[in-house]
Image (spheres, rainbow, N blue to C red):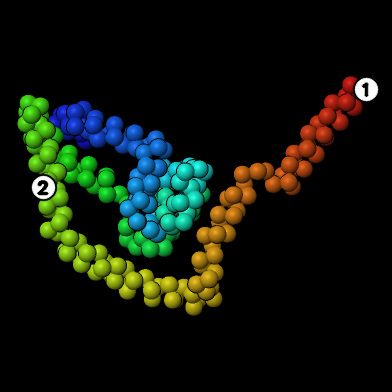
Amino acid sequence: MIRSGELYVLSSFFTIAFTTLTRLRRAKYPLAVIARMIRAGIRCRRCAYDIGCAFQGTLERSQLLGQAAHDAGIDSGVNAFHGYGHNRLCQLGHHPLYEEGFGLEDLETCERFFSWLNGVGGVVRHASHFHWVQFVDLAMRQWDKDKYSEISRFLYNNVRQASLVVAELEPLLAAFKQQTGYTDADIEGWKAAERAYLEGLRSEPEEVGLRLSYATLLGQLSDAEYVF
Ligand SMILES: [Zn+2]
């Protein structure tokens, strides 16, 4: 539930943050970010973006950046929440759960940051503009320090969690493959098969079209016989 202090932040500081994000949703901003990444020598990176599924098409069609981004191995994916909220085809193509190399990462860093920053709302509710800006600045500096000091623990916990997941799931997967006779290639092929099936549904199957035409013609025949 949003409290009044949080509303204050939402209506003031977050106005700036959300306006920035809204602008970022316009394609020219992420295009500019990717252009900057390429100039900085960054290679082989996937950028997480709220509408990364649609933005990837924009990037590929960009006359200035499309080829350069392709050569640099930079493309666009989506964060986990977007994947669940859009559609199954988007998930199959872009969700980090199905992307090799993301591991446990859900790409929701911004959401965690905004959630943490909600705590600032109650503190600055009655503050002057100067102290409001000052406190937000202090809070963000503190965020940086906290994350930097915790980075070793963060990496350790992630590695530990990944090891536990592998230790728990590998025996289950091995037992499943033994029971069913499926191989790794079979299981990995399911994603491509499901994607091909869903893409095939975009246009009506020929058999369905023929059946509908036949039913329509039967109706027309019945009408004609009734008239004559
Ligand atoms: Zn999508």
For residue 228, the mark is: 1
In the rendering, at what x and y percent does residue 160 appear? 24, 69
Q: Is mark 2 within 8 Å of ligand 1?
A: no
Assign a secondary structure to mark 1. Answer: loop
Q: Position of residue 29 (x, y in %)?
A: 36, 39
Q: At 44% from the left edge and 51% from the top edge, which residue is drawn?
A: 69
In the picture, the disc for residue 142 is: 2
Of residue 125 and residue 209, the one placed in the foreground of this image is 125
Q: Amino acid at mark 2?
A: Gln
Badge number at residue 201: none
Q: Classify residue 125 as left or right of residue 226.
A: left
Q: Residue at x 22, y 64 (%)?
A: 155
> In the rendered image of this protein, does residue 103 appear above or below residue 201?
below
In this view, the residue farthest toward the top is 227
Image point (12%, 37%), residue name: 136
**In x, y percent, where is residue 22?**
33, 34
Residue name at image x 14 percent, y 48 percent: 143
Q: Position of residue 149 (x, y in %)?
A: 12, 58
Q: Amino acid at mark 1?
A: Phe
Depth check, mark 2 against mark 1: the one in front is: 2
Placement of the N terminus among the 4 image quadrants = top left
Toward the bottom, the furthest residue is 178
Q: Residues within 10 Å of mark 1 (few under 14, many from 20)?
A: few
Dot 2, how many residues are within 10 Å of its Cα: few (below 14), some (14-19), or many (20+)? Answer: few
- Classify residue 214 by image quadrant: top right
Q: Which is nearer the eye, 157 or 130?
A: 130
